[in-house]
Image (cartoon, rainbow, N blue to C red):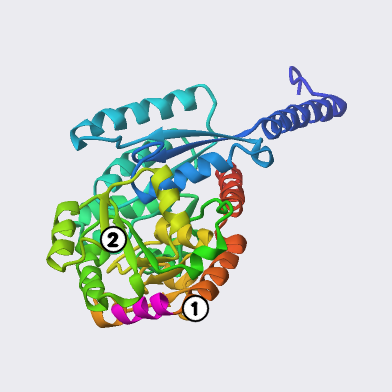
Amino acid sequence: MTGLKMTPPLACNQKQTDKARVSETKSNEKSARPLQVAIFTPLGAGGQGGIDRMMDELRGALQIDRFANIKAYFITTRGPGSILLSPLFLAHAIVCLLLLRLLGRVDVVHINLSAFGSTYRKLILARISRICRLPYVLHLHSGQFDYFWDSRKSILMKEMDLMFLKSQKIIVLGNYWKQVVSDRIPDCSGKVVIVPNATRTAIFKNPKIMDEAANILFLGRLGPEKGVPQLVMAFASLGAKSGWRATLAGDGAVNDTRAAVERAGLGDRISVPGWVDSAQVEALLHAANILVLPSFSENLPMSVIEALAHGAAVICTPVGALPDIIEHERTGLIVKPGDVEGLASALGRLIEDPDLRRRLGEDGKALHRTRLDIEVCAERLVAIWTESVHAGER
């Protein structure tokens, strides 16, 4: 067989060794640099929604030394202000993702997902991530995503299903939402991970606040979905019991809520300031010894987690992921959605019994330290990002 050039065995072995060394060098170089994450969030820093508040907490946590090997880019997808401007923010988000990919500065994409417009924007970003061969995780926050998912037409539902199927991980906030995903896409059940929302541990709070007259706080979007009309009716049935006072803070139906408070003759007891910024929220939480959230639907509200961090006694409804963290008579009191009488009874108990307020607050604070601290959450997210990158390389 003349003309056939044979490669000596030693030369073949040398080439294989060189390739292995190059591969190992590239692997070491990649492991030596920070893990780079593009995080899509709707309104950006200081946003009013629970997703943005959670991402603000995460942004702060990732600044500490223990997460020095993480480089996170927080990218706004909807933007504050008029919804008419949202296409501009989405276009900017797309350009940012493409530039990061082109420059080799992103390893994994973290997509915060809610219902309605959020889903439509994230379908686009998920598809671009797939085209760019970037692994992505979905982080489901909406308290109405189950109803939204089931109400979509078949074409859109198929696109949503594909977005979930092609993700590396699906982060949900509790067992209810894990079941929501698993029931609709059984093939995704193995990659659903529960990571509850989290906040920083609260700074010192005067323990004497628990012995003072009841100072009740509601934080959330004012309106029927959060059970605000029923809450005002429950307050009206309490009368002058033990000198309680309350603050109903949030955006939404502010004027309607103020009018309902005045009609109930409670204008001297209940303040309705409207939307409050993060500094005002912190001040309200420091002063409160009871938080009430009688919602008809939720995912895992930040206001409850913030209240646990501050040692306030919690009254809430068993919706969404709340039963995962609020155990009746131990870490809070649970009432049925829409049950005005039951809500008034729970409020009355905490108003009249400072010892019960203190016990629920202490147990809630212990729960926060072990499961709901933002550093615990950040560690879990970093592990999910790292695993998703490695899975995407296979």
Vertical placement of 16 versus 336: above or below? above
**Residue identifier under label 1:** 356
Vertical placement of 368 versus 89: above or below? below
Quadrant for the N terminus in the image: top right
**Residue 265 as seen in the image, left or right of residue 290:** left
Label 2 secondary element: loop
**Residue identifier under label 2:** 144
Residue toward you, 32 or 373: 373
**Which amino acid does the dot numbered 2 rest on?**
Gln
Label 1 secondary element: helix
Start-end of magenta stretch: 344-352
Disc 2 and disc 1: Cα gap in Å?
33 Å
Could you tell me residue 86's position as x and y percent? 25, 34
Q: Is residue 5 visible?
A: yes
Please report the residue visible at 69 percent of the width from the left and 35 percent of the height from the top. Answer: 31
Residue toward you, 137 or 92: 92
Vertical placement of 183 versus 133: above or below? below
Could you tell me residue 352's position as x and y percent? 41, 79
Could you tell me residue 333's position as x and y percent? 42, 77
Quadrant for the C terminus in the image: top right
Q: Main secondary structure of the magenta part?
A: helix
